[in-house]
Amino acid sequence: MPTMDFILPQLVHVGAILYLICFLFRDQILLRTFAIAGDLAYVTYYFNVADQPLWGAIFWNIPNVGINLLMIAMILRDRGTGNFTENELKLYRKLPSIDPGNFRKLLRAGRWMTASTDTVLTREGEMPDHIYFVLDGEVDIRKGGRKIDVDPGLFIGEIAFLTNKPATATVTIARDALYYAWPRGALQLARDKDNDLAGAIGTVLNMDMAGKLART
């Protein structure tokens, strides 16, 4: 049976192996969990390998453990929906392809609005300065003189945003309609700064367009 005299010197190698393994993961939770395990192996080794604990080495490993534990907690928080408001949760459920973390980033680029009167969001042939998601309320879409019947729960202005071309329809929402509005520039900047968010935005907008095509 292995003794502590044999096991203890191996901990430095165990720590190094755990650190090497952590870099094989893309998932931040797994990466940081293995990094913590590696640091704990190092701490145990430094505490027992000499007559006196190697406090200098231990000191610099402890903050690593604390930082990784903090980051894991933040990642788990971002992956959850527990702190969403009622309307944010309703909007999130309308966008099933986006994860909570990217959804929060998306929210930060815009704001909630309620129409005080019948409000024109886009005009056919004109470049809209916002992209919208109408969560609740009546929506009137006119394209080429033809009325298109739709229910709330859809993006408005997404084609113009993705193609950088004028709106393809005139869209009016009724008084008291609840919607989320993103300025084009703010959403474009958020997308350009974060590749992960850019992919999420592209996915949700393309899914919305596909749903519209399926309904027409």
Image: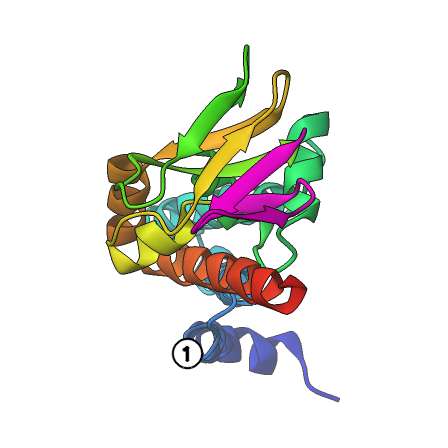
Residue at x-position 43% and y-position 31% = 121
Q: Residue at the spot x=49%, y=55% of the render? A: 47
Q: Please say if 215 is above or below 164.
A: below
Which residue, as the protein is rendered here, is positioned at the far top? 116
In the image, the segment drawn in magenta is 137-155
Q: Quadrant of the N terminus?
A: bottom right
Which secondary structure, mark 1?
A: helix
Rendering coords of residue 159 (x, y %) = 38, 55
Magenta stretch holds residue 10: no
In this view, 207 is above or below 7: above
In-image side of 79 versus 180 (left or right): right
Image quadrant containing the C terminus: bottom right
**142 within the magenta span:** yes
The image quadrant that residue 210 belongs to is bottom right
> Residue 51, position in %: x, y?
45, 57
Mark 1: which amino acid?
Leu
Between 59 and 205, the one lying in front of the other is 205
Q: Position of residue 92 (x, y in %)?
A: 64, 43
- Where residue 199 sits, quadrant-wise, is bottom left
- Name the residue that disc number 1 marks: 20
